[in-house]
């Protein structure tokens, strides 16, 4: 049994989400040149230089790139539409994406169309500099309109056990999980007795700058890019393919996954083209993840 299935009190029962952010003027905005059109769609531009956004050195299909782009585009287009009041906290509850096959580089511009409520009630398309489609994405989320979010989160974290340090956790080889350095490996090795799950650990030291070269976030919890990265690393171990990349997927968030506490990725089903997993912490299901792989990918 992986540890996250049995650890107590690390995952809470309140409405849980990912990609936390507070609405305010953004000094380091990712998307820019927002234009609201007559049909309510919004076009925008995206930087392609890794000088300010280090994760842009990664392949466009890399889960860190996909999740970062999804979150920034969803959040910032909603801000540009004036859908948030100053000081409101927002969070994602679900995202889905498909990577197109014709693109030759990172997305340079996109369009977002409202699908429903604020934050992520959108369908988005992204193109590269040659106008080749890179991604199709959708997102959903909520706005905390009447809650002292920081006070609520602080009360939730009370009673957690001591944080697990990086030295206490045995990480898989970074070569086996297809990342560039040891600090980027966030999952354990497969257990020969039960290869259907792995443990994972994200802390302030290995999940954010300056420790991790690409991951970023609010620092409040394990975010969607961490979870997608961990799921990809798990799949690479299962399929013995360090270069495996997802062609698309879907993630649903039910509970926060807490930093400094072990969580588990558990395989639900696995075929050549689709892997379904769930994320557990403290015996609670915190998220579900479905990834689609290229045809011919070998299942475990």
Image (spheres, helix red, strand yellow):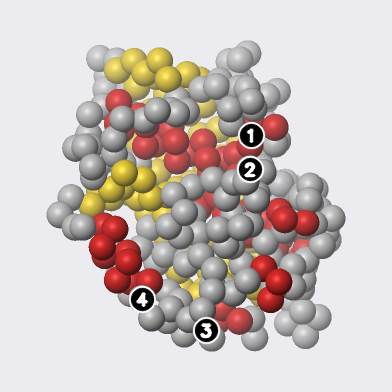
> Does residue 282 show up?
no
Of marks 4 and 1, the one in the foreground: 4
Q: Are marks 3 and 1 in contact (CB under 8 Å)?
A: no
Depth check: 257 or 292 in front?
A: 257
Mark 3 element type:
loop
Q: Which mark is residue 7?
A: 3
Query: Tag 4 or tag 3, which sits nearer the N-term?
Result: 3
> Disc 4 versus disc 1: distance between alpha carbons?
34 Å
> Would you name the residue on which mark 2 appears?
214
> Disc 3 versus disc 1: distance between alpha carbons?
34 Å
Q: Position of residue 95 (x, y in %)?
A: 45, 48
Q: Position of residue 104 (x, y in %)?
A: 70, 23
Q: Which mark is residue 229?
A: none
Mark 2 element type:
loop
Quarter occupied by the C terminus: bottom right
Mark 4 element type:
loop
> Would you name the residue on which mark 1 appears?
54
Q: Residue at x 33, y 71 (%)?
A: 156
């Amino acid at each position: 049994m992986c540890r996250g299935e049995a650890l107590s009190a690390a995952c809470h029962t309140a409405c849980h989400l990912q990609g936390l952010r507070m609405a305010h003027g953004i000094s380091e905005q990712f998307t820019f040149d927002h234009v609201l059109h007559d049909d309510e769609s919004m076009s925008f531009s995206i930087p392609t230089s890794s000088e300010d956004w280090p994760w842009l050195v990664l392949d466009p299909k890399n889960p860190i790139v996909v999740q970062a782009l999804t979150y920034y585009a969803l959040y910032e287009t909603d801000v540009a539409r004036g859908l948030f009041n100053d000081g409101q906290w927002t969070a994602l509850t679900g995202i889905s994406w498909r990577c197109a096959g014709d693109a030759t580089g990172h997305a340079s511009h996109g369009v977002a169309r409202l699908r429903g409520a604020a934050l992520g009630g959108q369908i988005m398309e992204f193109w590269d500099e040659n106008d080749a489609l890179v991604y199709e994405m959708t997102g959903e989320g909520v706005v905390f309109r009447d809650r002292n979010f920081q006070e609520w989160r602080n009360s939730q974290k009370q009673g957690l056990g001591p944080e697990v340090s990086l030295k206490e956790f045995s990480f898989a080889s970074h070569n086996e999980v297809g990342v560039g350095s040891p600090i980027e490996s966030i999952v354990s090795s497969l257990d020969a007795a039960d290869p259907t799950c792995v443990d994972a650990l994200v802390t302030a030291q290995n999940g954010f700058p300056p420790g991790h070269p690409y991951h970023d976030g609010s620092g409040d919890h394990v975010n969607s890019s961490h979870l997608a990265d961990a799921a990809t690393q798990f799949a690479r171990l299962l399929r013995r393919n360090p270069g495996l990349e997802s062609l698309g997927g879907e993630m649903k968030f039910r509970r926060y996954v807490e930093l400094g506490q072990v969580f588990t990725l558990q395989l639900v089903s696995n075929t050549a083209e689709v892997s379904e997993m769930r994320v557990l912490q403290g015996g609670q299901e915190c998220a579900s993840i479905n990834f689609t792989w290229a045809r011919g990918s070998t299942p475990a």
